[in-house]
Image (tube, helix red, strand yellow):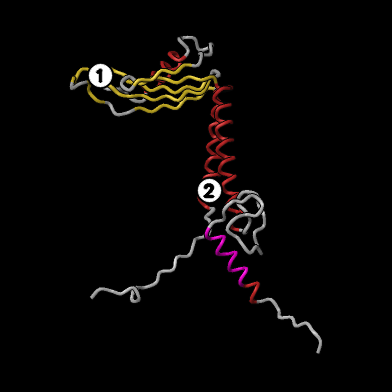
Amino acid sequence: MPRTPADRPIVFTTPRPPNLRPWTAALVIVVALSALLLAAGLVGQFGRRDIFWSGAVRPMSGDAVQFERWETHIMLGLGTVALRRYPVTSTQPFDFPFADLNSRELAWATLTNGSLGRQPAPKFEWSAGSGGYITLPAWIATLLVLAIGAGVIAFVAKRRRALVRERTLRCRCCGYDLRGLADSSRCPECATPTSPWARQQLAAASATTQTSRPLTVSGTV
């Protein structure tokens, strides 16, 4: 037997308050990542560090004589920040860890064209099949990290500040106190629409204020 509209259960949907945790976590992660990248840029300016890892060794095109693996290098030093990824071939299986040391020195020598005392110019060359490299002076990489990190941090902080204002029943845009307003659909200061949760809280606060207001009788007896 089909249900009539009167028999169907009534579902009440209550808007949820704004959640600050994702934006707080995002702010912490962005600050930590920006600090890490900034430190990497400074290391590239004043020191020399490199990170190396390689892929699995495999025969080239089914040939048991030639072996190949992909190597990735992140190099910080000589006033340079560089990323290199390319395939390396050998006539015998790679011997770890000695091949890693040779690959590191070869990558540094290739980066500076054989001269470890000369800072390479900014370059970008990449292809899908043969890999490539990205080379930037450390000061440019540091400025890029500062600019991008500052922009993202400002955006996340602004969004979190708006949610904090909304939780305290203020306008998300200008911070105007919305408590006690008869019409809480928009901010009277900047006309920013309020969220369903804020309107519900403001309506409940207004109803509580009206019911708790003392009754005053004026006149003469």
Query: In the rendered image of this protein, does residue 116 appear above or below residue 189?
Result: above
Residue at x 42% of width, y 24% of height: 73
Local secondary structure at mark 1: loop
* Residue 145 place in picture, x, y as percent: 55, 30
User: Along the polypeptide, which appears first: circle 1 or circle 2?
Assistant: 2
Magenta stretch? 196-207
The residue under label 1 is which amino acid type?
Answer: Gln
**Left or right of 161, for residue 26:** left
Splitting the image into 4 quarters, where does residue 8 fall?
bottom left
Q: Nearer the viewer, residue 102 or 39?
A: 39
* Residue 205 place in picture, x, y as percent: 61, 68
Q: Which of 99 and 19 is in front in this view?
A: 19
Q: Judge the density around disc 1: few (<14), some (14-19), many (≥20) Cα neighbours within 10 Å.
A: few
Q: Judge the density around disc 2: few (<14), some (14-19), many (≥20) Cα neighbours within 10 Å.
A: some
**Left or right of 114, for residue 127:** left
Residue at x 27% of width, y 21% of height: 68
Label 1 vs label 2, nearer the camera: 2
Q: Looking at the rendered structure, which numbered label has been put on residue 92?
A: 1
For the N terminus, which image quadrant? bottom left
Residue at x 44% of width, y 23% of height: 83
Residue at x 41% of width, y 26% of height: 52
Splitting the image into 4 quarters, where does residue 71 fall?
top left
Local secondary structure at mark 2: helix
Give the dominant element type of the magenta stretch: helix, strand or loop: helix
Residue on which the image places disc 2: 23
The residue under label 2 is which amino acid type?
Answer: Trp
Q: Which of 181 and 137 is in front in this view?
A: 181
**Left or right of 217, for residue 97:** left
* Residue 153 place in picture, x, y as percent: 57, 40
Query: In the rendered image of this protein, does residue 89 appear above or below residue 167?
Result: above
